[in-house]
Amino acid sequence: MINKKQLSESPKRMRLAQAAFVCIAIASSARVAHADKSTVRPEVGYNYQEIETPRITATNGAVRALSSSIEALFDNPANMSASRVYHLGAIAQIWPESKRQSYGAAAVDSVGSSAKVAGGLGATYNLQDTDGINRRWTDVRFALSYPFSDKFFLGAGGRYFWLSQNGVGPLGASLASSGLADSRIVRGLAFDAGATFKPTDGLAISLVGTNLNNPNNGFQPLGIAGGIGFGKDTFSLEGDLAADFTTWDRTTMRAMAGGELLLGDHFPLRGGYRYDDGAKTHSLSGGIGYVDTAFSAEIAVRRVVSGEPATAVVFGLTYHLEGNGLTQGETDSF
């Protein structure tokens, strides 16, 4: 909920071209790293099919109530209407122990429609343990949201997803753990929905459902999550709970807490904590970035400090073609 100054006037086409060039350059620089087989359980590196920006990673996922812009596309579509922005960004995730890489780009526009409907589109290409299970998947997300007032937002979106797994799994070369050679074992569309209520200035309460059509496989887990956050111009705090009904052999919970502090009007400092009941892990996270009126560059790290070791490093670059920053600001009057 850290507000930014309005963008200075400049040719929109030039900014769009610059942003597209940067996103394509980052995405095309990806190289498949071949190393030893991962010793971490695949569920840990897969991370519940979540795609994380640096802000999501730095707060350990505790941004469902206070997210906006590109974060909202990936964790709560309702919050794309939380601030008036037109943002285009690129992200990269590296998981050393899990041997995972993810590269993608996304755009969110909440200023281009006279009907105040916000829209977002994002796509990522993902690799996991290429010398082990050799899992590869593409995740395309799209969403719309509408602000019924300055206090209540609703959003819905879809995920088109296809995945192959052609390596040797924990049971050897078997259908159960290795997948079908040269075939996509999962391919289809799933749906998300979210709602955010802001009863008072600074306070936000959100509820989000993921894969609500229940594809009935562990690659597209059915989940419900909620968050309560409070934020002002230079700081925010939030706590989230998420239930997963599919990944493990029982319903599991994840508890997350995170916060942000804006230093010098340009440097967001973030931190977070997560307990994962499924993997039985505790993790800490942190991140920093530079945010200006025209762009932002951010980095975040999450590390498991108790339980199966895993690390995630996430980079992000966002161009602000128009808007009031990466996080929630004042919406237009309704």
Image (cartoon, grey):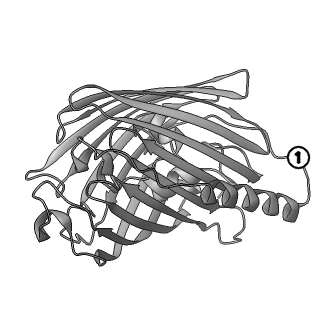
Horizontally, residue 202 falls left or right of residue 47, namely: right
Horizontally, residue 284 falls left or right of residue 278, namely: right
From where the camera sits, is residue 150 visible?
no
Horizontally, residue 219 falls left or right of residue 95, namely: left
**Image point 47% across, 32% down: which residue?**
301
Q: Return the residue nearer the eye: 222 or 186.
A: 186
Residue 293 position in % (x across, y down): 79, 41
**Image point 33% across, 34% down: which residue?**
256
Q: Return the residue nearer the eye: 50 or 21.
A: 21
Q: Quadrant of residue 180?
A: bottom left
Q: Residues within 10 Å of mark 1 (few under 14, many from 20)?
A: few
Residue 119 position in % (x across, y down): 59, 67
Residue 51 position in % (x across, y down): 43, 53
Residue 63 position in % (x across, y down): 45, 41
Q: Which residue is mark 1?
A: 8
Instruction: Tell me the quarter of the image containing the C terminus.
Output: bottom right
**Image point 62% across, 37% down: which residue?**
298
